[in-house]
Image (cartoon, rainbow, N blue to C red):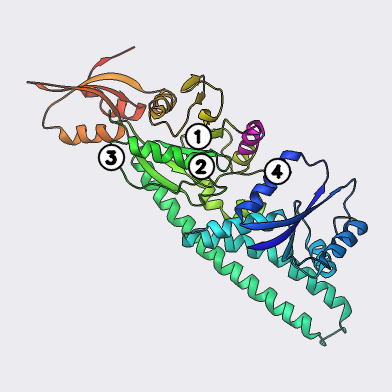
Amino acid sequence: MEDIIVVFADIDTPQEENEEFIELIKACDMNIVTCFKQPLKAINFRTFIGKGKCLEIQTYLTSTKVDTIIFNQELSPLQIRNLEEIFQIPVLDRTDLILAIFEKRAVTPVARLQIESAQLKKLLPRLIGANTQLGRQSASGKNKGAGEKQLELDRRRIKARIHEVDRELKKVEAQRHTQRRARQRSRLPLVALVGYTNAGKSTIMNQLLRCSAHKEEKQVVEKDMLFATLDTSIRCIAQPHGHSFLLSDTVGFVNRLPHELIEAFHSTLEEVKYADMLLQVVDASDEEKAKHMAVTMETLREIGAGDLPMLTVFNKCDKTEYPYPHSKGHELYISAKAKDNMDALLSALNKQLFAQEHHVKLQLPYEQTAIYAALMKQACILEREDQEEGMYLDALLNEELYQKYQQYIIQLYA
């Protein structure tokens, strides 16, 4: 386990953000040896923190073996380079830490490519800055120092690798676009699970899969940890009465999610933008839930999904005094661990997701098995009654199906 020093360089940073930062460090399996704190009125452009605090940390390092120093803020390439020269050990900032967590969690080849892209783009400015600094010290013209030549080679290799990784990610994006078009042709509505990391999105997906009439065993990773899920998982939820929909689970959000990650995970996060409805999952037991919801909404707006219809699910109510299951407007209070709460969730989902559908009675001849099969997949069959002249179906149809099968409708309910 890596031994680290944490530096809280605070500029009006709320205490809860510092506590979350500690949780991020724990998620990366690092051992905190000690913490240094310095309230700042202004940032030192060379080292972020002041000279006195640098000297204090430097003195501490003479008597204690530490592997890395981590700052709770974003540092510039210049600041990181200067701090590493002072302390003679690696210095990481908040973005480096989150990237390290994602690297540990990445399982699929696509996730690994996305993380590599973000890491390389974070590293490149540091090399460019170092190259510029050496350039001022070397002779002019063609006579470059050995260090500068090596940095230039490293910079070219990194640029080449970034180009290669981005090309692979564009292929993935094209594949996902093709898959998305195929899903849209199926006419099944898509519900996207979104929310702060570790709010219980994967638990809800797995519980709904267990309730599914398809009885799919494609469970997703479900752990009590930050960023347990990095890849988008899409599953079909088939309800017993025939109303099927697609449910997607993706990476959780976090306060100040690094821009490099949003850019690298563009194709993954973009799936949310094409959803028919969002299911925002909130940890009801977390005192910072209001801030977490604000972070979620900010991230959704950043990826172009801020205006989609939404049902907010307050999960983990078993750890609170909230009554559950309980519905209030577009809010639902549940405990995903309680299987009977899934009925309340499905009811709330259906009410909002299929609100615009037509409640009709159809008469289908028995030979129209293809139409019946299509309705079973794309509509909600509430009841079927077999009579001598054919099948009588009590069903909910969207506008497209309503127009398509108008000739078989014998009654429209108010």
How far is the residue under mark 4 from the one under mark 2? 29 Å
Question: What is the x, y in percent for residue 359?
Answer: 31, 19
Task: Point out the frontmost of discs 3 and 2.
Answer: 3
For label 4, the residue is: 19
Q: Pick whichever of labels 3 and 4 is earlier in the sequence.
A: 4
Alpha-carbon span between mark 3 and mark 4: 42 Å
Q: Upstream in the sequence, badge 4 or badge 2?
A: 4
Q: Is residue 89 left or right of residue 100?
A: right
User: Which of pointers 4 and 1 indicates the residue nearer the eye?
Assistant: 4
Q: Which residues are magenta?
A: 286-297
Mark 2 Cα-neighbour bin, 10 Å: few <14, some 14–19, many ≥20: many
Residue at screen point 45% across, 49% down: 221
Which numbered tag is attached to residue 214? 3
Mark 3 in CB contact with mark 1 (< 8 angstroms): no
Of the two numbered discs 3 and 4 in the rendering, the one whose residue sits closer to the viewer = 4
Helix, strand or loop at disc 3?
Answer: loop
Q: CA distance from mark 1 to mark 2?
A: 8 Å
The residue singled out by tag 2 in the image is 272
Residue 266 lies, in percent from the top left, at: 56, 51
Q: Are marks 3 and 2 in contact (CB under 8 Å)?
A: no
